[in-house]
């Protein structure tokens, strides 16, 4: 009997521990799924508040939008948050709308597939990570609490967050005018082609700067601001952080 009592107590303790460490699941969720036509060179904007945004590409003249609304509270709250879409042949706008008085604990996580050459004019969220993969024309990426990740991207990329890291694989194209990556509390990693010629300005207040590529340092009239060139100089690149590090790395060649 004593052994049985001990086993029961141990089982109860393990069950309590499992409940304490188990991930919290949303009490309710609902999926939104639509496909909208968009020209191969069309423009896309997305505005979100609570939730991540992931963008991938495909070779169709259309945008597939999948969004999951979730809440840890009652399901009725999902009806208070809408997904507004403006669709034209050359332009698509997606926006998450909350009640004016706020106070609704609902997250919306987006996964998009877009034409490979579509212009991602602006993607933004407040609480969540932005991730873009293989897009040819990336523009403004903005979040407040979350990371920004760009894999094999090109365009005039301007990535900015407050509490998060920025990882930018920049596949520079001939028409590119430059790129910038900035954060306040986090680190910046820029991965670029080894032969890229660029003028670099790096603002690093409480951290360090390093480069795997030959970097010719130039003078600066400001403290904690580094200016220099990759190669003979060329396209402008601006990198910045307050509390974190900045690192430039060479992209691995592919066969």
Image: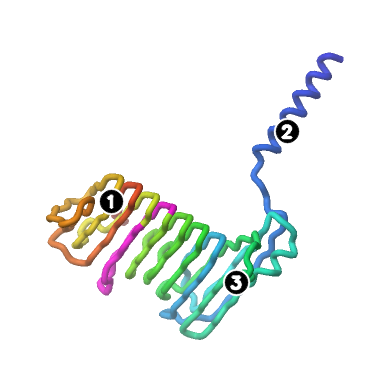
User: On the image, numbered disc 2 is attached to which residue?
Assistant: 16
Badge 2 local density, few (<14 within 10 Å), some, or many (20+)? few
- Asked whether the viewer can see residue 33, the reply is no
Spatial distance from mark 2 to mark 1, Cα to Cα? 46 Å
Mark 2 lies on a secondary structure that is helix
Q: In this view, does 225 lie to the left or right of 135?
A: left
Where residue 124 appears, x then y in whole percent?
47, 66
Vertical placement of residue 25 versus 64, above or below? above
Badge 1 local density, few (<14 within 10 Å), some, or many (20+)? many
Taking the spot 38% from the left edge, 62% from the top edge, the residue there is 159
Q: In this view, does 222 lie to the left or right of 53?
A: left
Taking the spot 74% from the left edge, 61% from the top edge, the residue there is 75
Q: Given the current orientation, which residue lies at the most extreme top position?
A: 2
- Asked whether the viewer can see residue 57, the reply is yes
Where residue 152 appears, x then y in whole percent?
37, 61
User: What are the residue bounds of the magenta stretch?
Assistant: 163-182
Badge 3 local density, few (<14 within 10 Å), some, or many (20+)? some
Between 69 and 242, the one lying in front of the other is: 242
Q: Given the current orientation, which residue lies at the most extreme bottom position?
A: 89
**The C terminus is located in which quarter?**
bottom left
Vertical placement of residue 143 versus 37, above or below? above
Q: Earlier in the sequence, mark 3 or mark 2?
A: 2
User: On the image, numbered disc 3 is attached to which residue?
Assistant: 97
Which of the two marks, 3 or 2, is nearer to us in this view? 3
**The N terminus is located in which quarter?**
top right
Q: Which of marks 1 and 3 is nearer the N terminus?
A: 3
Taking the spot 79% from the left edge, 18% from the top edge, the residue there is 6
Q: Residue 64's quadrant in the figure?
A: bottom right
User: On the image, numbered disc 1 is attached to which residue?
Assistant: 204
Residue 166 magenta: yes
Mark 3 lies on a secondary structure that is strand
Where residue 16 appears, x then y in whole percent?
73, 33
């Amino acid at each position: 009997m004593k052994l049985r009592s001990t086993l029961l107590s141990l089982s109860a303790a393990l069950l309590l521990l499992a409940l304490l460490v188990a991930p919290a699941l949303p009490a309710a969720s609902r999926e939104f799924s639509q496909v909208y036509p968009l020209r191969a060179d069309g423009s896309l904007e997305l505005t979100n508040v609570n939730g991540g945004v992931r963008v991938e590409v495909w070779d169709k003249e259309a945008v597939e939008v999948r969004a999951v609304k979730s809440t840890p509270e009652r399901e009725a709250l999902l009806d208070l948050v809408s997904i507004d879409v403006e669709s034209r042949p050359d332009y698509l706008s997606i926006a998450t709308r909350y009640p004016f008085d706020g106070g609704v604990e609902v997250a919306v996580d987006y996964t998009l597939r877009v034409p490979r050459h579509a212009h991602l004019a602006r993607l933004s969220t407040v609480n969540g990570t932005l991730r873009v993969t293989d897009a040819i024309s990336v523009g403004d990426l903005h979040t407040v609490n979350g990371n920004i990740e760009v894999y094999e991207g090109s365009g005039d990329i301007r990535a900015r967050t407050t509490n998060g890291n920025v990882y930018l694989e920049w596949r520079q194209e001939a028409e590119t005018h430059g790129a910038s990556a900035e954060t306040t509390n986090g680190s910046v990693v820029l991965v670029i082609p080894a032969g890229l010629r660029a003028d670099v300005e790096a603002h690093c207040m409480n951290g360090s700067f390093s480069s795997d590529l030959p970097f010719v340092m130039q003078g600066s009239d400001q403290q904690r601001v580094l200016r220099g060139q990759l190669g003979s100089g060329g396209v402008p690149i601006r990198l910045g952080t307050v509390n974190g590090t900045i690192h430039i790395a060479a992209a691995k060649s592919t066969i």
